[in-house]
């Protein structure tokens, strides 16, 4: 869909457990300005994105989490992609009540509120803002 919306295919990279063979080249591109890199949680462990000077000057890496995992360690790994070695950058998370973490662990509004409260607490704990 990104390409359909005008993103240049040369500016888009995807890292999964199946495509991890060319990871050095993909990570080199990921640290440049105007690049989009999609990384699955299984491939995110140990990934270190080095920022170009131009990207540092523009505020650093901007990472988006499309869901929360039931295991906090995966979320922590994701957030760790931003701000490594003192680099600048921010991360944001988008939550949907249709996410697996809600559908698996809550069947009532009260349970959904409980799961949401835990996720917000998790977010605040790791977000310095």
Image (spheres, rainbow, N blue to C red):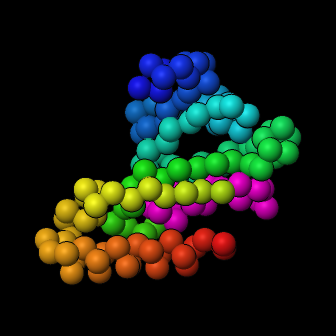
Whole-percent x and y of residue 10? 60, 19
Whole-percent x and y of residue 67? 39, 55
Is residue 86 covered in magenta? yes
- Residue at image position (64%, 31%) is 35
Between 100 and 20, the residue placed more toward the observer is 100
Above or below residue 2? Residue 128 is below
Whole-percent x and y of residue 54? 84, 38
Between 20 and 119, the residue placed more toward the observer is 119
Number of marks in the rendered image: 0
- Residue at image position (66%, 57%) is 90
- Residue at image position (46%, 31%) is 19
Segment tinted magenta in the rendering? 74-89
Placement of the N terminus among the 4 image quadrants: top left
Report whether residue 120 is seen: yes
Q: Classify residue 41 as left or right of residue 59.
A: left
Q: Classify residue 76 as left or right of residue 83.
A: left
- Residue at image position (74%, 44%) is 50
Report whether residue 23 is seen: no
Between 12 and 25, the residue placed more toward the observer is 12
């Amino acid at each position: 869909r990104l390409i359909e919306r005008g993103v240049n295919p040369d500016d888009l990279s995807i890292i999964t457990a199946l495509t991890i063979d060319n990871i050095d080249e993909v990570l080199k591109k990921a640290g440049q300005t105007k690049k989009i890199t999609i990384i699955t949680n299984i491939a995110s462990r140990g990934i270190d994105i080095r920022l170009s000077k131009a990207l540092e000057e523009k505020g650093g890496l901007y990472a988006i989490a499309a869901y929360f995992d039931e295991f906090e360690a995966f979320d922590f790994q994701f957030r760790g992609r931003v701000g490594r070695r003192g680099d600048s950058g921010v991360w944001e998370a988008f939550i949907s009540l249709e996410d697996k973490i809600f559908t698996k662990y809550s069947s009532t509004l009260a349970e959904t509120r409980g799961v949401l409260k835990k996720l917000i607490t998790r977010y605040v704990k790791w977000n310095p803002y």
